[in-house]
Amino acid sequence: MSQFVPISPKVSLPRLRTTDSRIRRLLEKEAPMEAWPIDERKKITEKIRYLQDRYNDDRTNIDYSSKHTQIAYAIAYYPNYVEGLTQILELINRSHSLYNEWASYFHEQRRQPLNVVFFGSGPAPELYSFKRFLDFLCRQAMLPDGGYFPQVSVDLFEMEQAWEWSLDNITKSLMNHERQPSHRKMNINFQQHDLTKPFSSIANQIKQEYHLIFLQNLANEIPTSDQETRSLINNLKLFIGRLKPGVGYCVIASRGFQNYRVNNLIRHYVEQEESLEFVIDSKKIELNANCEEQKDKVLKDYIYSELYVGSRFDYRRFDNKSHVIAIKSVVK
Ligand SMILES: C[S@@+](CC[C@H](N)C(=O)[O-])C[C@H]1O[C@@H](n2cnc3c(N)ncnc32)[C@H](O)[C@@H]1O
């Protein structure tokens, strides 16, 4: 049996540089943007402003159901959030050798399931990030072949069913999902669920063990009522309780007041549980890896043609840093 090659804790995954133009090309599958009907253009720019307003005011109950809102999110937010997961895992790696820990686990387990869950995934930029991370990890550790690559099962728990359009047309396209060789093809399950409602009805769908639980930009959209927040925490605890000891992590990354509340409640829980420890305890992180210079010119012209030209409006405005906590399940 071959050995895996240890990965230096300093190793970094190359940053994604072309996401903006790649997203445009995906959106242009049917026609170039210039040829899109003017009404459509207007609706998309309106939705960009709608999302910015909602996020700035920390409002909940955001309506993501229309295709225009999803295109607006793909243009204005998706590129910012696509690398959050990679950045956070890289950070954990520096202090906790996550890459070698996982590579060693994949090596020992040989094609065992790797269960991942994303809460409030929306179009799931974190899933694209996760795929790249995994491919990179196995390549660096020289575990690329069908004998070692884990069988990845991903559950996306999301309230808005309509996000499946973005999942299929953007994230799965970026991942080249349909053309993956069978040993690398992830089993992706989109599950419509309001995470502020008890999980009891679907408890039988919760897997035996999880290796990664990831919540990106969800907490700030949970209403501040005690009952809803507690329900989210109780649901989350069900999953955290099933983290695989020694290799299982839970990451919560979001911004705003409600995120502090969620994080504090989770902190209280972790402090009481011997099997859990913090690996990142409240760190502010700039998750917008794709900054100004990567803006795509065609996309920019398209958006600005319908916005107040010359004004200071920035469709990729990104003010606040995310607040991140990460928990590990340790071997008792
Ligand atoms: C800003 S989006 C984040 C999407 C993705 N995680 C990202 O980082 O780009 C927030 C997502 O949380 C979902 N969401 C909000 N409240 C929810 C709830 N109670 N249950 C499940 N999903 C919820 C929304 O529908 C939306 O897709």
Image: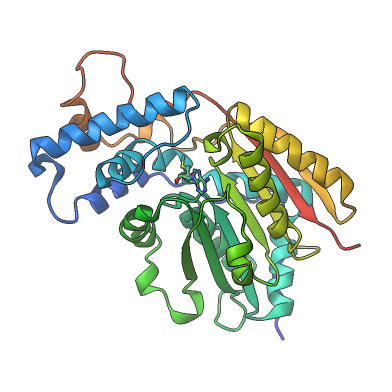
Total marks shown come to 0
Q: Nearer the viewer, residue 285 or 42?
A: 42
Q: How is the image coloured?
A: rainbow
* 204 displayed left or right of 175: right
| Residue at 31 percent of width and 26 percent of height | 49
Q: Position of residue 48 (x, y in %)?
A: 31, 31
Q: Residue at x 55, y 55 (%)?
A: 118
State left or right for residue 134 relative to residue 94: left
Q: Is residue 281 visible?
A: no
Q: Does residue 236 show up?
A: yes
Identify the image quadrant of residue 145: bottom right
* Residue occupying image coordinates x 37% and y 39%: 63
Q: Is residue 62 above or below residue 159?
A: above
Camera-side residue: 1 or 194? Answer: 194
44 on left or right of 291: left
For the N terminus, which image quadrant? bottom right
Figure check: 12 above or below 147? above
Task: Check the image and name the residue furthest to the bottom.
Answer: 1
Q: Could you say which quadrant of the image residue 117 lies in?
A: bottom right
Q: What x and y, as percent, mark residue 252? A: 64, 44
Give the residue displayed 11% in from the left and 43% down from the top: 36
Q: Position of residue 261 (x, y in %)?
A: 68, 32
Q: In the rendering, at what x and y percent does residue 123 appear?
A: 41, 51
Quarter of the image with the C terminus in it: bottom right
Q: Nearer the viewer, residue 147 or 123?
A: 123
State the image quarter where residue 263 is shown. top right
